[in-house]
Amino acid sequence: MTWLDILILLVRCLVLALASATLFAYFTLFERRLLAKFQHRIGPNRAGYIPLPGGKKLFGGWLQPAADAVKLFLKEDVVPAMADKWVYIMAPGFAVVPALIIWVAIPLGTWPDGMGGNWLHYAPIDVGVLYLLAVTSIGVYGIAIAGWASNNKYSMIGGVRASAQVISYELALGFAILAVVMQNSTFRTEEIVTSQGLIWNIIPQFLGFIIFLIASTAEVVRSPFDLVEAEQELVGGYNTEYGSMKFALFFMSEYIKLIAMNAIAVTLFLGGGNFPGIDTLVAAIKTSNGDTIAYAVQGALTLGAFLLKTTALSFLSVWVRASVPRVRYDQLMHLGWKVLLPLGLFNVVMTAVFGVLFPADSLIAKIIMCVVGVIVVVIVSATATPKHAKRGVTLVNPSAGN
Amino acid sequence: MLDAYVPLLAMVGIAVFIAVFVLSVSRILGPQKATVRKLAPYESGMEPIGDAMARFPIKFNLVAMLFILFDVEVIFFFPYALVYRQLGIPGLIEMGSFVLVLLVGLTYVWKKGALTWD
């Protein structure tokens, strides 16, 4: 490796980090506008509009993330007197670094550099799936440390809740990812993408996909599993004592992790950047325009498809946030340990049995697994509720008076 | 094949740089007018009572212990996941008995009420 290579690598990494930060900034706008639509409001529509003749305003709100960032940069940087000062200051860093480094192991598309590499896959490591699992769960350290170092009771409860929640759902997440590894017999993320072919993993691994969606939402402590920052009971949760850019870094890590989880779901279950017909298209361009242009077009198209799928899943996340009320802590633990963990184990056993009895690319096995998965999801979602949360039970006895 | 890990290392460096940069820039740009009230921990407007780094319910500790137990067992599955097609039926039976042991453990913990949060 020459110095030039290292420089190019650093610039590429900087581009990736800034791209994910921009993605986060515009995801907040996307979410705020969508939530406003869900609630019959307008949402942020002022910052940076283009005035048209006739009083109409175009693209209102597109500078809102920038305005928020400038505001947060200019806020006072407070370190509470009773806090553990250095741990308190470092905690946002512990939260944001894992969120940013998730992206290197995700193949964001296919753009061959002509030497067997891929511009859109930074680190094609041979334990990619394990790396993703490790980095997504290490992010909770930031939250737990922040809760402890703030020396505030709300933060402390938020941090402890976060640790328990994340480790509980990590088991289900691990089982869901394990089944995908078994399906494709590889730990390399790019091989998982290519070996899915036209029948994406969501078909044989439908049950795994549902488990992954729920567990990943809980893993990034996102609504309806956001008990860590339940504002009605915990003020702000682990970030109560944080302000200025330190708060923004927590916010950023949470949202980047959410988008990254959706990106991992796209990689593992929805075929990554592939879509039907991409191979013939690239082959056609390659014969007419040469390799370089064909590779660039392939890179642009696969990256576009990847981002489109990720956006679709992110829309689902916003939709869930707008529709589903927050769960109670006992319901959270019930879902994680008594529903998703046995289901994940079942899914792994099913994948193993079908994988041993049928050849690797058997279509019949995939269809049977899909049908079984759908049936199991329907039955479990209809029956699995905590015993004491049945209908007809009221918390307040109206005849008891005052 | 360690070359593939170099971008990862570079990304860690960039991420740490961004975190440090953002934290120090807001430190420089923001005003610094600390008062006693402002630096007190927020406790719904009350004077803070006692220290927050105190005891918390043992249930969280129990969850952590159960996690360690089951997560180690999940890790045992990962080597199997790569070679289970070559191992065939005998491997399936061996892994099935391992799953059975795991299920016995889960049932025990479940019946003991360790998974019920109340």
Image: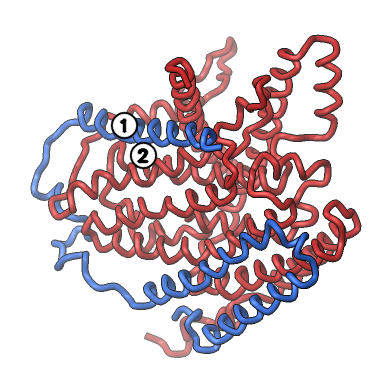
Asked whether the viewer can see residue B24, the reply is yes
**Residue B90 sits above or below residue A317 on the image:** below
Check disc 2: other Cα within 10 Å, few if <14, some if 14-19, many if 20+: many
- Amino acid identity at mark 2: Ala
Q: Are marks 2 and 1 on the same chain?
A: no
Place of residue A105 in the rendered image (x, y in percent of width and height, measured from the top left): 56, 39
Q: Can you tell which chain is drawn red?
A: A
Residue A187 is left or right of residue A196, and the answer is: left
Name the residue: 60% across, 78% down.
Answer: B102
Numbered badge on residue B22? 1
In the image: residue B49, left or right of residue A123: left
Question: Residue A319 placed where, x, y %?
Answer: 61, 49
Residue A171, quarter of picture: bottom right
| Residue A248: numbered disc | 2
- Residue drawn at x 30%, y 29% is B21
Q: What kind of element bears circle 2?
A: helix
**Residue drawn where x is 47% and y is 27% of the image:** A13
Q: Secondary structure at mark 1?
A: helix
Residue B97: quadrant of the picture = bottom right
| Residue B54: numbered disc | none
The colour one sees for chain B in the rendered image is blue
Q: Residues within 10 Å of mark 1 (few under 14, many from 20)?
A: some
